Image: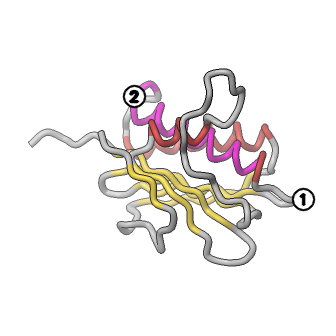
Amino acid sequence: MTHQHLTDEAKPPLTPVRQLTLRFSSTRRGARLARRLAVQQFTEWTGLPHDSNPARATALVTAELASNAVRHGSLPGRDFRLTLHLLPDRFRVEVTDTRPERLPVPVTAQPADETSGRGLLLVEAYADRWGRTVRDAYTKTVWAEVLLPTTGS
């Protein structure tokens, strides 16, 4: 599996088959609810079980992106936005927060004794592509895509 990190992308690569956008409070509870909703929507839209590898990858990348939005991307009283896209061959998770000046730093290996800073390494490992987009002076979106299994020919 190859992983690709893209720093900016103008739009999702394909027209979504389905799309859902919701706002969550910039709290740990909001991040947890975003992860749960993403997995539930993933399984509903794809028909894949909760314990499938793509569902687990979706849970992990959503948890990390939402957690980062809460920890590094929030301003008092401002929510974060979760947008889910079912594309023909992948599931895309987008998390938009209110701190465009705080871009994710490039992924590098962390010392073994570090207790934080590994989240984007996990996104890099579990997402097939991920990146960030800044479209205005008020928000940034960090996104990740999980490929869907192909049906046999």
Residue 59 lies in the magenta stretch:
yes
- The reply to whether residue 43 is in sight is no
Number of residues whose C-alpha sits closer than 10 Å to that of mark 2, classed few (under 14), some (14–19) or many (20 or more): few
**Residue lying farthest to the right in this orientation:** 76
The label on residue 77 is 1
Tags 1 and 2 touching, CB below 8 Å: no
Magenta stretch? Answer: 51-70
Which residue sits at x=69%, y=27%? 114
Rendered view: 120 above or below 138 = above
Instruction: Tell me: residue 52, above or below residue 146.
Output: above
Residue at the image position 84 percent from the left and 60 percent from the top: 78
Query: How would you classify the magenta stretch by its main secondary structure?
Result: helix
Q: Quadrant of the C terminus?
A: top left
Q: Position of residue 2 (x, y in %)?
A: 31, 44
Q: How many marks?
A: 2
Q: Earlier in the sequence, mark 1 or mark 2?
A: 2
Q: Which mark is residue 52?
A: 2
